[in-house]
Image (cartoon, rainbow, N blue to C red):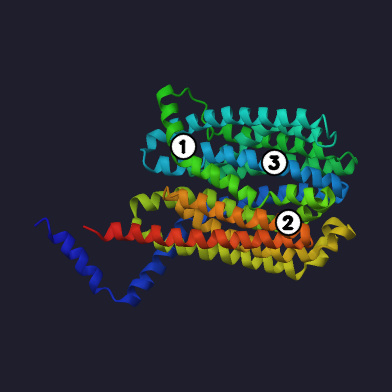
Amino acid sequence: MPGEPMMSRTATRVAIPEGCSRWAAVASAWRIAGRWKAPIGFALLDQGITSGASFILLAIAARVLPVDEFGRYSIVWALSLLLMSGATALTVEPLAAILSSRGPSMRIPILAASAQLSLLLGGVVAVVILMCGLTAEAWSSSFAPLLLCLAATSPLQQLHLASRRFCYLLHRQGVAAASACVYATILVGGALTLWATDTCSGWGVVLLSGAASLAGLSVGIATSCVPALRVRRSLRRCILRQCWRTGKWLAGSSITLWLSSASIFPISAAIYGAAETGIIRAQSILLMPVHQFTWAMGYLLVPHMADIAARHPRRVGTMTLLSIGTLGTVAAAYSSIILLFSGDLLTLIYNKPEITAASSLLWPLAVGAIVNTIAAAMAIVLTAKGVTKPVFWARVASVAVFVPGAVILGSILRVDAIVWAMAAASAVCGLILASALMDTVRRSQSAWRSP
């Protein structure tokens, strides 16, 4: 009879003891982790190599450049992060949810359309940066060369980010790792050359990053992870509409994320000067591997979580707990090590007394890194489910806490107050995302249980 399978399934659920159900969930999590062993390994290799190369470049720049020049470079870096993360959120981030609802045969055409949109948007971003550089030349000769070099390299960096994400969407994490090796070779080799020849400068670091992005992008193109196909105009318009539908919230979330984190560099420069910005940036570099690890797991988990949410909704709760627990534990362990050996590490890496003397900044930076990692894990699940509006509003709330707090407290107290305000903003964001995530998982499981 048609009603018998449903009755049997319901009866089976009632008959399973609570303890057995819990152990079954744990066993399911271990089986999933076993199947993901190779993708996770390549993802960690990819992000580890990329993060390590970026760390070496920034550490050399912070050690060699004057603190105020490194502060100006950090401000321009923050600007590039704002523009490129917003562009990526519009054209690349929504693809996981889009691809999960389409057949495998549509993956390549959709990615080709997204690559074309990324190239177009990267050109627009470059023009905006170029105009900023030409404007800055009239009042600040120190910022103009940095911005002009960034305008030349930003499209390459934008496409490189897209190509890495395409590798994960195609489940070709090995290609992403190979691209990271090429990228790191150019970046580290160039940084060591600049240091050895005593020619390191802020604008030179920007150009070197662009050259490394071009090398990494070439691997994605050579392996067809960045499809170079002619796409029907109707498909391009369709993908544009779908990306805009969810990407506008992700782009808004990226902008608000920037306002609640990376905006600390221009804010601190406006209040204390570029030298203090350079010190804050140098301290934050030590926590950079935490954020890089989180981004790597985001690249890996979003497409997998989207597939699980579409095909096995009952596993969403288990995977959510596994993701949050794993990322949070790694972030806490790494941050603890940095805090334990902070003075020795700062002296060894930078060899600048003014940076070592500000080691107290690492405490709020570490707290913020841990909270941000947990919040990012929750945002990964929400993004995979296509629930992006709460992510945006959570970031808006964090901006409402951080920007006024940083400006007011920074003007009255020391620079530590600005960094603590950033950590408090991260906590507010995490609380809002936790509420939205619990509601989403509850509705997903209720939909699965309902006839």
Q: Which mark is residue 119?
A: none
Residue 79 location, x and y as percent?
A: 69, 41
Name the quadrant containing residue 83: top right
Identify residue type, mark 2: Ser
Q: Earlier in the sequence, mark 2 or mark 3?
A: 3
Q: Residues within 10 Å of mark 2 (few under 14, many from 20)?
A: some
Q: Residue at x 39, y 57 (%)?
A: 440
Q: Is residue 120 above or below residue 372?
A: above
The residue indicated by pointer 1 is 243
Residue 97 location, x and y as percent?
A: 42, 44
Q: Earlier in the sequence, mark 1 or mark 2?
A: 1
Q: Residue furthest left?
A: 1
Identify residue type, mark 3: Leu
Give the position of the C terminus as an image quadrant: bottom left
Give the position of the N terminus as an image quadrant: bottom left
Q: Is residue 314 visible?
A: no
Q: Which mark is residue 79?
A: 3
Q: Residue at x 67, y 30 (%)?
A: 128
Label 2 element class: helix
Using residue 199 as the reference point, say whether residue 114 is left or right of it: left
The residue indicated by pointer 2 is 284
